[in-house]
Image: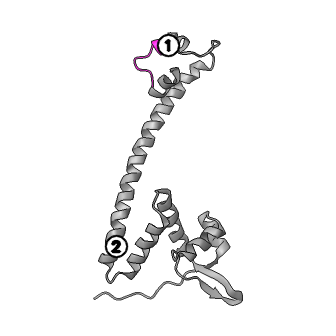
Amino acid sequence: MLVAEAPVQSKLLKIGEVARRTGVTLRTVRYYQSLGLLGEPVEVKSRVRMYPERVCRRIALIRDLRRLDLPLERIRALLSARHEAPTGAEGSAELAGTLAEKLTQIEERLADYRAMKENIGAALAHLQTCLCCPRKPSTAVCEACDLVRGCDEVPPYFDALLA
């Protein structure tokens, strides 16, 4: 039989500290709060809103999902479905599917970035010799250059500059 552990008390943070730690604006924290993405803040004396530290991790998740083009409404629906589900399995299935889809997108983007990095590096290597060239760049001049003619394969980005 599983025994539920007592919730761990975390340090409470003022909204400004939450914003600073997460790299978002105060306005963003308030907006996420108004959408129900952060749970309820704990109010202490002087009506100061205080948030548990875990809100910073929630904001980081939201920020990262937004960077992957997931709309805030979809994020809200996923998070609320998880908390409103009768079982962990039911609450996690859709979220797990969305995260798996986003992971695939990240892997595809990384592959694209690696290819771009390689192409840019090759173009930069070729452009280093162009830095000393006294001639006006043109398709005819550049194609007649020993650098271009002496290559087995002209890097794609460099070739695009010749056009």
Label 2 with label 1: CB-CB less than 8 Å: no
Using residue 126 as the reference point, say whether residue 12 is left or right of it: right
Residue marked by disc 1 = 143
The figure's colour scheme reads: one colour
Q: Residue at x 52, y 24 (%)?
A: 161
Of residue 3 and residue 93, the one placed in the foreground of this image is 93
Helix, strand or loop at label 2? It is: helix
Q: In this view, does 43 lie above or below 55?
A: below
Residue 62, percent across and down?
50, 66
Q: Which residue is drawn at 43% across and 67% down?
A: 74
Q: Residues within 10 Å of mark 2 (few under 14, many from 20)?
A: some
Q: Which residue is drawn at 36% across and 54% down?
A: 104
The numbered dot on residue 128 is: none
Residue 109, percent across and down?
42, 47
Give the residue type at disc 1: Glu
Is residue 54 rendered magenta in the image?
Answer: no
Dominant secondary structure of the residues highlighted in magenta in the image: loop
Q: Which residue is drawn at 44% across and 21% down?
A: 154
**Residue placed furthest toward the right:** 46
Residue 35, percent across and down?
53, 75
Residue 32, percent across and down?
56, 72
Give the residue type at disc 2: Ser
Quadrant where the image shows the N terminus: bottom left
In three-dimensional space, the C-alpha distance between marks 2 and 1, rounded to whole angstroms, equals 58 Å
Helix, strand or loop at label 1? It is: helix
User: Which of marks 1 and 2 precedes in the sequence?
Assistant: 2
Q: How crowded is mark 1: few (under 14 residues within 10 Å), some or many (20 or more)?
A: some
Q: Residues in magenta?
A: 146-155
Residue marked by disc 2 = 92
